[in-house]
Amino acid sequence: MTTADLRDPDLPGLLLTTERDGLIPLLRSRADADFAIPTAACPGWTVRDVLAHCSSALMRVVESRFEKGVFSPEANDRDIAERADWSNARVVDELERGMTEAGPVIAKAGGVLDMVALGEWVHGGDVRDVLGEPGAYAGPGLPHALRLLAGITRYKGTLPLHADLDDVDEPLTLGAASGERTPARYIGDAATLVRLYAGRPVQGRAFELAGAEAAELNIFG
């Protein structure tokens, strides 16, 4: 059985629409001033910048615009700058459209775009975190995100890790099995595990990680 055989092509779209249904109403309920708050997870970016990045990335997927250097830091900054004159509401509208329409395109891509969906969900956590909203890196999308994370780490061939999650009944196996390295072990809550794999701050959070350094888990670079 190959990694492709294990992949659920509908999972990225399910994660995106689940996140859409929670995040979009939240954003529409917030004052314009909230969009100008700096984010801790993405230094130099405000909440609005994160959302503009997310909406533009998804529209690139929807419209199959993958020119050289797409998703690079420079391209991300250009996409944000192109939306500088947009209202916050227009950015949110574009984000809603992207979260609705990108799933089928990602499904047909064979796995190479699955990380876009996971990244969008993580950025939703970044926004919730800075706005003081519950459910950052958790909430209704968490089961889908964990399944997608497991598949992406297999696809990318990351180090093997066994996770015993405090708030999830079944243990989670991540990364690619290898006889060259004993699987690392994680004990803690699921949101902190997501933070580790997304390179988000984990200071003050209770967890155990053995057999690997936190920096080795970061799949976003």
Image (cartoon, rainbow, N blue to C red):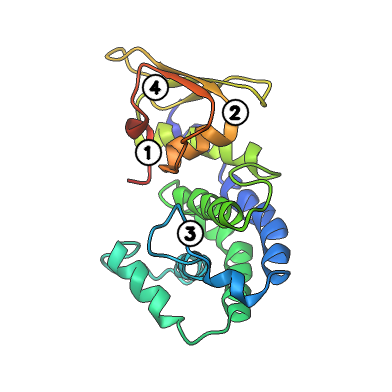
> Which of marks 3 and 1 precedes in the sequence?
3
| Secondary structure beneath label 1 | loop
* Image point (38%, 58%), residue name: 43
Q: Residues within 10 Å of mark 3 (few under 14, many from 20)?
A: many
> For the residues carrying marks 1 and 2, which lies nearer the camera in this image?
2
Residue where numbered disc 3 is placed: 39
- Residue 73: image quadrant is bottom left
Q: Nearer the viewer, mark 2 or mark 3?
A: 3
Above or below — where is 182 with respect to 172? above
| Residue pictured at 60% horizontal, 69% vertical | 34
Q: Nearer the viewer, residue 76 or 127?
A: 127
Please name the residue that numbered disc 4 is placed on: 160
Alpha carbon separation for disc pair 2 and 3: 23 Å
Q: Please state which amino acid type lies under the numbered disc 2.
A: Asp
User: Which kind of residue does numbered mark 3 sit on?
Assistant: Thr
Q: Tell me the distance, in whole angstroms, between the alpha carbons under discs 1 and 2.
A: 17 Å
Q: Are marks 2 and 3 in contact (CB under 8 Å)?
A: no
Count neighbours of disc 1 (C-alpha within 10 A) and say few if under 14, some if 14 to 19, many if 20 or more.
some
Q: Residues within 10 Å of mark 4 (few under 14, many from 20)?
A: many
Q: Amino acid at mark 1?
A: Asn
Q: Distance from label 2 to label 4 (Cα)? A: 18 Å
**Secondary structure type for disc 3:** loop
Q: Earlier in the sequence, mark 1 or mark 4?
A: 4
Query: Callout 4: helix, strand or loop?
Result: loop
Disc 1: which residue? 218
Nearer to us: label 4 or label 3: 3
Camera-nearest label, 2 or 4 = 2
**Residue 87 badge:** none
Q: Amino acid at mark 4?
A: Pro
Q: Which residue is mark 2?
A: 189
Sequence-earlier tag: 4 or 3: 3
Left or right, 34 with respect to 152, comes to right
